[in-house]
Image (spheres, helix red, strand yellow):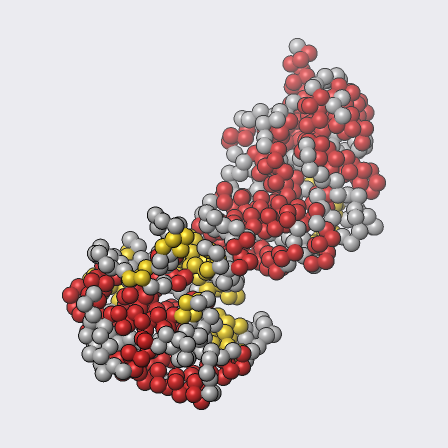
Amino acid sequence: MPTLTLSGCAPVPLAHYLKALGILRLVGESPKGDLSASAAWNNDQIILTSRFDGKGLLNFFLHDYQPTPVLAPWNGGSGFFKKDNREAIDAIMASGAARLLNYQNSLTAARQAVNQLDLKEKPDGEAKASLLQICRNTLPDDALGWLDAVFVLSQDGPKFPPLLGTGGNDGRLEFTNNFMQRITELMDCATGQPSPHSERWLRAALFGAAASGSTAKAPIGQFFPGAAGGANATSGFDAASAVNPWDFVLMIEGALLFAAASVKRLESSGDGSLIYPFCVRQTGVGYASASMADEKDARCEMWMPLWERATSLPELRAIFSEGRAQVGGRAAKNGVDFARAAVSLGVDRGISAFQRYGFQVRNGLAYFATPLDRVRVRRNAHSDILSDLDAWHSRLRSKADDAPATVLRGLNEIERRVFEFCQDDSPHARVALLVAAGRTQRALARSFAWVAESFIPPLSGLRPEWLIDNPTTEFRLAASLASTNAWLGRGDGKGTFWLRSQLEPVDIKTGENRVWLSWLKNPSNDVTWHDGDLTDCLNSIMARRIHRVEKAGCEGWPDWSPCYARLDDITDFIEGRIDPAMLADLIWGLSLIDWQTVAYAKKQGREQEQDERITYDWRDDEEYRHRAIPSSFYALLKLCFRHNNDGIPIEATLHQLARIGNGQAASRLAARRLRASGEAPLVTDLPVAATTARRTAAAMLFPISPSDMKLLKLTLQHQTQEQTA
């Protein structure tokens, strides 16, 4: 069968995309067309396979094409009322051409519906709803496809899909009367023969042929912003709208493939909600000029499917009739949801990409179908982890209208990072999304009054799959801190003391293998995180942990983590070779992980035998074994803060001396404590710089493994022996 490349049809602008659909629909359903016709997208052009060659396709549209009855007697300017432009509708009604007979029958039925209600002008309210109902009941079957595409009757009144404006008009532009006017330009209505310019216009519309006079002055509406005219549209001050009549006609014909429906969703208590193929609420992320301000006035956004495999009209109708993307068992609600669906196989198979359009206010108050982005459909192996954010994100999005500016910025960053992650599931993209979630949670903690009023829960319980292989120094250090917890015993004010409770006012409850969070009703003295110098912040957290440990009467230092820090990473921290801002962001992001699951698996000894994903001991590599370890000063202090430290009492003074930069006094005190407990460090006096002392004091927070603790002890003895020699 002949294969034709229709260069005049492209995914952008929307008018040309709809034109491609119109060509396939008309060829595939016409008795004089080809019921086996199929089409596919290749290099941003539609490839049509049918019995027609180029000449045959031209002949089909010029002589055999029967226009679909496109009419809207409920609109002003539609040609049905006294003050309307009636030239086109009168020409069609007076035609003797067989190809316009169906149109005439539908126009006659529509006029009878108007007369039945004795309407003299455009109806509103109940009169309009009544007219829509009569039209749906009485118009011939040939017009029902148009009616289904342009309005839906629901229990709570008529609803109008966004693609065709508000019932077949967009502001002052009435689509149906313009459609009839373009028909009268393309053919002699009296005989049905093509007009003198029709073939030239058709060649340009189908094959992109450049020719003088290939456009006429006529409105195109929201579908082709570049041809809509207006200010700065030409070399002068203003330009008129220009359109190829065949482009407009085929565009409207293609829009009929989008049939709306009114459904009652199981999760909704309302009467019904309008659904439209591949149509969701606007989200201001994922494109170069993205802004949350676009969401306020935008009608919606539509994701137009592109397919690379030859697809027949019945197959395409099936795709459009079920054109609802699924995310986690529910329909996609906005652009972020649709991006997730596109990479998680929640859309109809066979679609290779989506061209995303936003119906946004541009050029004054006009709505334009603005091309936003091209999203490839591909399987993202890690996209399932996004479901961890679903409930929290939905609640936050629903309350965004009156949210503080910091929360709105966080929400926007999360949605932008989700979009990026859907297209790039690399570890870098995963970390960026985790950081965005942590920043937003930090913004919520600062907006406690609004959070309590809006019932926004703290985000928690992210599955361990959010962790990555081969992480950076900052990531490893942050993971060791975020997972830190201490068992302070039973009783009031004791229990498990997680480091996250020092970041924000949350109540953390734990079970054997899970953890759940809620906001504290009253401020907590445990919250010691503050912005500014990270070293000072970590020292504040350490000081509070020491206070809690002393108050609980614990024997030894109780901090434990399923994710130990590496000694070489701690050295980098002490010597100032890390990015403190990134470390702070990662501490907040990684605190959202369900570390109880990791801890439970590690305690059961199953992290490597039964679950390959739980491999968070980043010390088991050859590179680590040959990296530098911290100084003797760090070793002295850390040996006094080791887990189950054989009876060495915890003393706040030791940490406080190092925290204020007095490393020499701190080293003396640490040496005395170790000797009193039976240890024999040869070093007694280590003068260090104040900055190094403060960072070393903060480094006491990082949990290390028992084997690394033994290594510190041996290293301390080895270094002091060398110093003595």
Q: Position of residue 573 (x, y in %)?
A: 62, 29
Residue 487 appears in which quarter of the rendering? Answer: top right
Q: Residue furthest bottom?
A: 116
Q: Residue at x 63, y 41 (%)?
A: 587
Residue 19 appears in which quarter of the rendering? Answer: bottom left
Vertical side of 183 occupied by 290: above or below: above
Q: Position of residue 110 (x, y in %)?
A: 39, 84
Q: Tell me the quadrant of the picture where the N terminus can be found.
A: bottom left
- Residue 285 shows in the view: yes
Vertical side of 372 occupied by 260: above or below: below
Q: Position of residue 227 (x, y in %)?
A: 35, 57
Vertical side of 304 occupied by 271: above or below: below
> Is residue 230 shown left or right of residue 465?
left
* Residue situated in front as seen by the camera: 197 or 318: 197
* Residue situated in front as seen by the camera: 292 or 525: 292
Q: Tell me the quadrant of the picture where the C terminus can be found.
A: top right
Q: Residue at x 64, y 27 (%)?
A: 574
* Residue situated in front as seen by the camera: 398 or 513: 398
Vertical side of 173 occupied by 463: above or below: above
Residue 14 appears in which quarter of the rendering? Answer: bottom left
Q: Residue furthest top?
A: 725
Q: Residue at x 53, y 72 (%)?
A: 273
Q: Residue at x 68, y 32 (%)?
A: 533
> Is residue 506 shown left or right of residue 55?
right
Q: Position of residue 592 (x, y in %)?
A: 63, 48
- Mark count: 0
- Residue 24 shows in the view: no
